[in-house]
Image: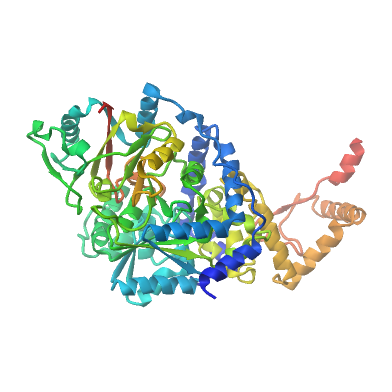
Amino acid sequence: MQSTSHLFKDNAARALNDAHLQQALTHVRTKFITKRQDAMDALPEFDALRDAARDLKNHVLSRLDEYLVEFEGNVVKNGGRVHWCATPADARKTILDICRTAGAKTVTKGKTMVGEEIGINDHLAANGIEPIETDLGEYIIQLRNEPPSHIIAPSVHVTRDQVEATFRKIHTDLDPNRNLTEPSSLLHEARVKLRGRFLVADVGITGANFLIANTGSTTIVTNEGNGDLTQTLPRIHIVLAGIEKIVPSLQDAGLLLRVLARSATGQEMSAYTTFSTGPRRPGDVDGPDEFHVVLVDNGRSKLLGTEFEEMLRCIRCGACLNHCPIYHNVGGHAYGWVYAGPIGAITTPALIGIEHASPLPEASSLCGRCEQVCPVRIPIPKMLRHWREEAFERRLHGNRARWALKAWAALATRPALYRLAMRVGVGVLGMLGSRRGRFSSLPLAEAWTRHRDLPAPQGRTFMAMYRGKK
Amino acid sequence: MSARDEILNRIRAGRAGPKPYPGSGPVPQRGQVGGEERKALFTRMAVQAAATVDRASSRADVPSLVKNYLSQHNLPAEARLAPDPRITELDWASQPLLNTSIGGTDGSHPVSVTGAFAGIAETGTLALTSGASSPTLLNFLPETHIAVVDAKDLTGTYEELWERLKAQYGEVMPRTLNLVTGPSRSGDIEQTILMGAHGPKRLHIILVDEP
């Protein structure tokens, strides 16, 4: 996928002026947050489970090579195949080769964020194989030719009216006068349309929420059941997974399942959690004849041992997006690549390079809600600051921003000078603004005053008042 | 160098010293119940997930409960039975108005009746394992899925489920283990939950006290 992360400011400005998007985002601002809170309240052990989930992931990352090798051995023992892919190009080629060998014409797909990372849909389509997204949200955005805007709710930026318009435009074989007012009629139409596609697909591609080392199983979590039809009906099942998805055993997957759905949608469990181990067994009535696991690195392994290692704990629940005031306002597409929101702001620079994504770590007020709600306690604000430092060191900011940051650093590291500057600045601004109480324009502060007034300082500085109290 | 070696070498170069295995976290108190309490918890959680639950005192009651459920909901009086002796050996002839057939499905059957490997009270979840007697598609293609679970197969927690799986299957997992919590749903249109996305619109569970 072509990234526009470097254009975040333009993307965000457009998003703020998009009435449809703003209407759609109201649902994120409210529903996800209360549902998660209710699920937390219903499970007293929730915070202890988050600690345990963090510790488990740290353990896995410290022995990632061993668990991957163990996983591979068990997949093979159960009749499956493992394909190691260092780059997106490797993964695209591997999947295309499997599809070609099978003579595949259509491929159904469950939801996979790694699939977005490697751009598998465009690659298959360019080679004459039709990819069909089956998750309702993914189906909607595939018809609209858009990337997902949320990790677990890919079409969250689309309103009901827009879904109806899209279905009318694409499903031209259906009665143009049909009633699609109720959301349930839209769901029904997608169900009927996709049921036909499920039954004839040659290959099914799913992602994986977990890979289980000691059984060689892969796990998907869905609410619709689309992932299960995707992987059970076609002759070939391909699992596409990042190498960080591994856990030692079923018990450990159980731990992560206890925090995953609650953090994501506020459910106790998603409707369908499915463990797949190898291809169909002798005597089985259904299931695929071939089982392939495509393990994708794409820059993950080089994060180990760096200040960014902890982001590999992510289980892609989307809670940080749901609680982010920036995401609430600009939505997912503004982030310009596959992963949006706080986790996107730290993951995108890691996977495509900070030089292509330097505005993303700036797109945060560092309010810390993302870290507060993260089921594996990823210190996202700390990492945003790391990326800001790296962007500064690599001179990715404009000269003006560099100069301003340097001036700020000079002040902030010299307390006496800082206090003097504050006293003078507050005094001067207070005097200048004493009549109106605010500034509607100010030199060097246009970025602020273009959108809102700056209140004029009133009275003395904090330090002056603090000393006065003592 | 192969991609495998390249990836593994990079991991080995970067990873910290091994951290000890920290365990898989606390087991929620909620599920640590037995007997009637366990059945009640399973029922409450399954209903919370939008499934419906009937109680049967013995398996012999299952055919009539299936028939009654279908007629109460104005559903077709026909059921595709999993080739599971626990299901097929019941007296389906006692329900002359109910058409039954046995086997997997290609999507042409509106109702399925399957057995369950276990039920997990902690979250009201069914555990369904694939095999000759339990085709996976019966859990997904029909619009109505009726699952029969014996009370003796209820576990309180997930920890007990993993132990039972190991006791039954040893080191080799069944091809598919489905954990099913309520019917299929989607929230992808304006975050409003709608039932029956791609899988069953209805999940009805018959909890059997004494097999």
> Residue at the spot x=28%, y=56% of the render?
A287
> Residue at the spot x=62%, y=44% of the render?
A372
Q: Is residue A438 visible?
A: yes
Q: Horizontal placement of A221 versus A389: left or right?
A: left
Q: Is A211 or A194 nearer to us in this picture? A: A211
Residue B60: x percent and y percent?
18, 28
> Residue at the spot x=23%, y=42% of the render?
B144
Residue A233: x percent and y percent?
27, 58
Q: Is residue A318 above or below residue A100?
A: above
Q: Horizontal placement of A462 versus B137: left or right?
A: right
Q: Is residue A113 visible?
A: no
Q: Is A365 or A263 nearer to us in this picture? A: A263
Residue A460: x percent and y percent?
86, 45
For the view shown, which residue lies furthest in the bottom direction? A127
Q: Is A251 or A360 nearer to us in this picture? A: A251
Where residue A356 sits, quadrant-wise, is bottom right
The C terminus of chain B - image quarter: top left
Residue A339: x percent and y percent?
52, 60
Where residue B182 sits, quadrant-wise, is top left
The N terminus of chain B - image quarter: bottom right
Q: Horizontal placement of A405 versus B29: left or right?
A: right
For the view shown, which residue lies furthest in the top direction? B36
Q: Is residue A42 above or below residue B171?
A: above
How many labels sit on residues? 0
For the view shown, which residue lies furthest in the left direction? B96
Colour scheme shown:
rainbow
Q: Is A37 or A410 nearer to us in this picture? A: A37
